[in-house]
Amino acid sequence: MSDRSRAHERNSMIELENVTKIYQMGNLKVAALNGVNLSIGEGEIVAIMGRSGSGKSTMMNVIGCLDVPTSGQYILEGEDVGQLSDDRLAVVRNRKVGFVFQTYNLLARSTALANVELPLLYGNGKDHRRRSMEALDRVGLAGRAGHRPAELSGGEQQRVGIARALVKEPTILLADEPTGNLDSRSSEEIMGILQALNREEGITVIIVTHEPDIAGHTNRVVSMRDGQVIDDKAVANPRQAVVQGIER
């Protein structure tokens, strides 16, 4: 076992141990994950890569507590996710994990601020507006809080999506193809924000992508094929993205 693997075991936040996920498709059983072993340490920034059907999105769903393994164990910060009730699973997901989507998933008629506030609406706190403005400020969009999605560029809409993921102060940020709908400049800025959140705030960032350039902004690349991890290696010289309009 390598020194890096031992370090992962000592400081792991996420542990998948021989995880399988089987879906029933009529009379056919499909193994989306097939004996996955993976450890991700607190504060890492990791890319999960693979072709369509490789299992990378299923693994993201398991890590994000959107789904549970068919067999094997998923240990998240010491808790066996497979043993949790649906209610407890929802609590863990809402408190620990923030999601960023390729298609932004913003409400078209709501302002950027209102979109960021959405995850807080069912809580009892009275500081929703302040927390949402702070989240927008963290991604450089405090000045665009009153704009609706149609008035924002694609990159700005994705920044709103990141702010919405951040507003509940998650320890893990899961980004599913976060630059898939963006041009190269906007992609670079989004990766710069994710790098800064990881580097400066210690958030564990996991990015699902099929783009090698995007994976090159992380410190580690996990490659998947046919529901299995086929490679797991450190990135020797991660690219540092430049973000315009954010003072750090």
Image (spheres, grey):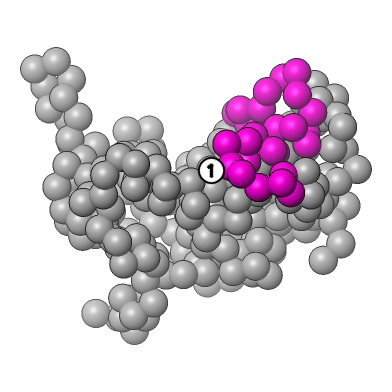
As drawn, 82 above or below 200 = above
Front residue of 215 and 158: 158
The percent coordinates of residue 33 (x first, y second) are: 23, 43
Question: Which quadrant of the structure image shows residue 41?
Answer: bottom left
The residue that appears at 21% across and 51% down in the rendered structure is 83
Q: Which quadrant would the C terminus be assigned to in this image?
A: bottom right
Instruction: Assess whether residue 227 is covered by the magenta stretch.
Output: no
Where is mark 1, residue-wise? Answer: 99
> Which image quadrant: the N terminus?
bottom left
Residue at the limit of the structure toward the bottom, as seen here: 3
The answer to which of 239 and 159 lies nearer the viewer is 159
Magenta stretch mostly in which secondary structure?
A: loop
Q: Is residue 186 above or below residue 206?
A: above
* Left or right of 212, for residue 28: left
Segment colored magenta: 103-128
Q: Position of residue 174 (x, y in %)?
A: 50, 48
- Residue 37 position, x and y percent, is 24, 59
How many residues crowd around disc 1 within 10 Å: few (fewer than 14), some, or many (20 or more)? many
Could you tell me which secondary element the residue under label 1 belongs to? Answer: strand
Residue at 57% over, 63% down: 203
Residue 131 image point, x, y percent:
73, 50
Residue at position x 48%, y 55% in the image: 96
Q: Residue at x 75, y 24 (%)?
A: 110
In the drawing, does residue 245 fall left or right of residue 61?
right
Asked which quadrant contains residue 112, the reply is top right
Q: In the rendered structure, does residue 105 fall within the stretch colored magenta?
A: yes
Q: Which amino acid type corresponds to the residue marked 1 in the rendered image?
A: Phe
Q: Residue furthest right?
A: 143
Q: Residue furthest left?
A: 27
> Does any portion of residue 103 appear in the rendered image?
yes
